[in-house]
Image (cartoon, grey):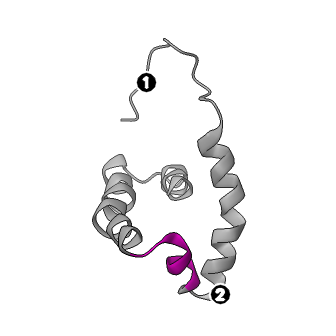
Amino acid sequence: MTAQVDEFAERGHPWSEIVNESVIEAVDSLLPYMHARDVAYMVGNCSRTARLGARRWARASRRRTSRSPTRPPNSPRTSPC
């Protein structure tokens, strides 16, 4: 999802569209499905291309979500809008 948000932002999409296409889709569709099954089931039933993409992005996604934020603590936040 992070890569999707970055891609939309780099291509100049408005934040309302980014939220709709990424966050709301995940909350309404993806998360309930993953809760009912699991990630391995979901990836296993995707196309070969999607499975390879999921494996390719897994390491990068883990790095991006596990690293410390680049913004120093107590620094002012900037609005994305």
Q: Nearer the viewer, residue 35 or 60?
A: 35
| Residue 44 x/y as whole percent | 58, 83
Marker disc for residue 48: 2
For numbered disc 1, what is the local secondary structure?
loop
Instruction: Give the main secondary structure of the magenta stretch.
Output: helix
Q: Secondary structure at mark 2?
A: helix
Asked whether 56 or 81 is in front, the reply is 56
Nearest to viewer (mark 2 / mark 1): 2
Residue 65 horizontal/vertical position (percent): 59, 44
The kind of residue on which mark 1 rests is Thr
Image quadrant containing the C terminus: top left
Of residues 61 and 77, the one nearer the viewer is 61
- The residue shown at (64%, 79%) is 51
Q: Of marks 2 and 1, which one's residue comes earlier in the chain?
A: 2
Question: CA gap, disc 2 to disc 1?
Answer: 40 Å
Q: Quadrant of residue 78?
A: top left
Neighbour class for label 2 at 10 Å: few (<14), some, many (≥20)? Answer: few
Q: Is residue 24 magenta?
A: no
Question: Which class describes the residues within 10 Å of circle 1: few (<14), some (14-19), or many (20+)?
Answer: few
Instruction: State the residue lying farthest toward the left.
Output: 28
- Could you tell me how many numbered marks the image carries? 2
Residue at image location 48% in from the left, 56% down from the top: 8
Tell me, yes or no, whether the two marked residues, 2 and 1, touch with CB atoms within 8 Å.
Answer: no
For the point 38% across and 28% down, which residue is it? 79
- Name the mark on residue 5: none
| Start-end of magenta stretch | 37-44
* Circle on res. 78: 1
Q: Please name the amino acid that badge 2 sits on.
A: Arg
What residue is rendered at 42% in x and 54% in y? Answer: 13
Judge left or right: residue 63 versus residue 6. Answer: right
